[in-house]
Amino acid sequence: MAKPVISESPDGGWGWMIVLAGFLNNCLLVGVTRSFGVFFVHFTEYFQESSSRVSWITSIAMATQQFASPVGSVFGMQYGARPVVMVGAILAFLGMLTASFGQNLLHMYLSIGLLTGFGWALVFTPTMAMISRYFKRRRALATGLAFTGVGVASFFFSPLFQLLLNEYGWRGAIQILSAMMLNLCVCAALLRPITIQEDLLVASRGHPENIKKSTECCDKVTSAFDLTLFLHRGFMVYSFAVTLMTTGYFVPYIHLVAHGKNLGLSDYEAAFLLSVTAISETVARLFSGWLADLKLIRKIHMLFIWSILTGISLLLIPVGSTYSNLVGLSFFYGFCSGGLAPLFFSTLPEIVGIGRILNATGLFLMLLSIGGLLGPPLSGFLEDLTGSYTISFMTAGGFILAGSLILFFLPSFLICTVILPGQHSNDQVGAGNSRDHPAQADVTNYRLEE
C-alpha cells in the first residue's frame, strides 16, 4: 500500500516524537563523545601512550560516524530510517563492549573508533534528516531542542563516568556504557516515515522519463549518493567553512579535563568543567533555535556571529589559571558553541532543499569528518610538543575563526534580503528550471533563508 503524501512538513504532531528521538540520539552519541574526556587520562596511564595517540580513539569514532554518514543516508532512503537506526544501535553496543576487553590502542581504534563510529553513522544521519522533514517554520527550534540532549547528557555523564571509573575501573565503566547504547533502539522505534510532495518532485527530476535509465555503476552510485551536490557551490562553500569550525570545535570536550588537571584541579573539579560547559550549552541551543526562528536576521549571519564568539572563547581558555576562572571560561565557551549547533543543520535544508536533505546531511557529515579526525590529535600533538594545552586551544580558536571567514564566499552572503537572488538564476537545487515548476520555486531554488 502506497504511503500517503502530504503537501508540506507538518511542523508538529508526531514531529515532536521525532524531536524526542533526536534528543535521545544526541545524548547517547554526541553527549557520550563530549564526556569521553573523563576516560582520557585513564587511557593515557593504562596504555602508557602519548596524548596525541590516545586522542585518536575519539577522533576515529567521530570521523567514522561523519565519513560513513552517506552510507546511513543511502540505507535510510532504501530501507527506511527505523531499521537502519536499529542496526546502528546494535553495532554501537558491540563496539563499546569489545573495547572493554582492549589490550592496546589498536584494539580501541578498531572497536570504539571504527565499529561504534560506524554504528553511530547509521543512527545519527537518518534521525537528524527526519527532523528536517517534519519541520519547516520551526525547524531551527526543533533542531535546537534535539541538540539539547548533548548538553543534558554532558552535564550528567561527566560526573557519572567519573563515578563509574572510581567504582568499576575503565573496563567496567565502558561495559555499562555499551549497555546504554542499546537505548538507541528506542530512538529507532519513534521514527515514523513521512512522504511530502517535494520528494516526488526531486525523484522526477533525478529520473526523467525521456532519458534511458543508466545501468553503469558510476551513474548508479552518483544517483544513490546524490554526488551532484559536490557541484553545488553553496553546499561546498558551506561544508568547507563548517569543516574548519569542527576542527577546533571538539577540542575542549576532549582535552579540557586534562588541561584542568595540568593546572592542579582534582578529578571531580576537572570533570565539573565539562558539566558547566554542558549547562550553558543547553541554554544556548534553545535560545539560538528560538532566536533563529524569529527571522530577525538571516540564519547564515547568525551562524557567523556565533562562530566568531566561539573562536574568541577558545582563545580565552588559556587565560584561566584558577578553578573559578576556568569555570567562568567553560561557561562562556559552552554558551557560544551551543549557539552554533542548531544552525549547522537547520541552515542546510535552506541551501539544498528539503527533498535532498537526507543525502545532503550524509555528505555534509562526511566532509565534517576531516575536521573531527584532525582536531583532537593535532591538539594532543601540540600538548606533547609544548607541555601544555595553551597553543592547542589557541589553534582550535583560530580554526573556528577561519571557518567563519569562509562564510563570506557563500553566494550573496553580504545581502541582507530574506531570499537570495539565486531564486531567479542558475543557483538551483534541482536539475530542472524554475519555469518548468513555478509552483515549486520556493523549495527547489538555492536559498539560505526561508
Image: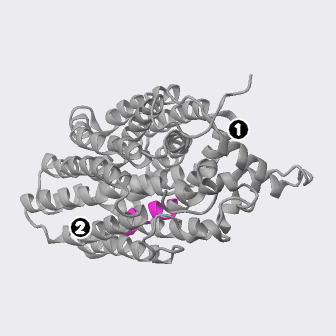
Residue 374 part of the magenta-drawn span: yes
Q: Residues within 10 Å of mark 1 (few under 14, many from 20)?
A: few
Is the stretch drawn in magenta largely helix, strand or loop?
A: helix
Q: Which residues are magenta?
A: 369-378
Residue 120 position in % (x across, y down)? 50, 42
Q: Is residue 176 above or below residue 310?
A: above
Can you tell which mark lies on residue 140?
none
Can you tell which mark lies on residue 313?
2
Amino acid on which disc 2 is placed? Ser
Q: Is residue 410 left or right of residue 392?
A: right
Residue 332 position in % (x across, y down)? 19, 60
Q: Is residue 228 left or right of residue 290?
A: right
Q: Look at 41% across and 56% down and name the residue there.
A: 343
Can you tell which mark lies on residue 78?
1
Q: Look at 72% across and 47% down and name the residue there.
A: 201
Q: Nearer the viewer, residue 265 or 209?
A: 209
Residue 50 shows up from this direction: no
The answer to the question of whether label 1 and label 2 lie on touching residues, with beta carbons closer than 8 A, is no
Residue 110 position in % (x across, y down)? 52, 47
Calculate the distance from the C-alpha at mark 1 to the C-alpha at mark 2: 42 Å
Residue 352 shows up from this direction: yes
Quarter where residue 334 is shown: bottom left
Q: Is residue 201 left or right of residue 393?
A: right
Amino acid on which disc 1 is placed? Gln
Q: Look at 45% across and 73% down and name the residue there.
A: 407
Quarter where residue 26 is shown: top left
- Mark 1 or 2, nearer chain start: 1
Residue 227 position in % (x across, y down)? 70, 59
- What SS does tag 1 mark? helix
Coloration mode: one colour
